[in-house]
Image (cartoon, grey):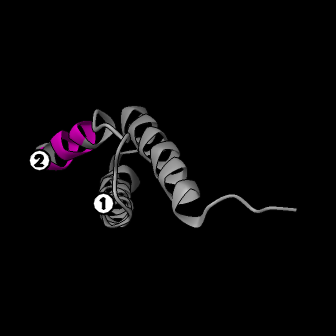
Amino acid sequence: MDLLLEQALEFENMKMSHMSTSDRVEASRKAKFLILGINGFYKKNKDEKLMDIMKRITEKKRKIEKRLKGRLTV
């Protein structure tokens, strides 16, 4: 679990500028892996710190995916 939390904090501190498309795809997949892993531990002990970490990672993942999909033009 400690390794998973270290990876989550590293992901949070990662810079998003100048990422290629493949870097964004990789980051999105890593975020999903981290969220699902932390969620497994959260289900067992309901620790609020874990929920906060998952929320921050999800927010960053949404930003990455928004950039991947692009903006809709009307």
Spatial CA span between label 2 and label 1: 22 Å
* Dot placed on the residue nearer the N-terminal end, 2 or 1: 2
Which residue, given by chain and number where applicable, does mark 2 sit on? 3
Q: Who's the residue at 32% across and 67% down the image? A: 22
Residue 7 location in percent, x, y?
19, 46
Of badges 2 and 1, nearer the viewer stands 1
Q: Which stretch did the figure color magenta?
A: 3-10
Image coords of residue 65 (percent x, y): 52, 59
Q: Local crowd at mark 2 within 10 Å, few (<14), some, or many (≥20)?
A: few
Q: Which residue position is annotated with label 1? A: 23
- Amino acid carrying label 1: it is Asp
Q: Find the residue positioned furthest to the left.
A: 3
Q: Is residue 10 above or below residue 64?
A: above
Dominant secondary-structure state across the stretch colored magenta: helix
Which quadrant does the C terminus fall into?
bottom right
Mark 2 lies on a secondary structure that is helix
Q: In the rendered view, would you say 70 is above or below 8?
A: below
Q: Which mark is residue 32?
A: none
Residue drawn 51% across the image and 62% down it: 68
Within 10 angstroms of label 1, few (less than 14), some, or many (20 or more) residues? Answer: few
63 on left or right of 54: right
Residue 9 lies within the magenta run? yes
Q: Quadrant of residue 18?
A: top left
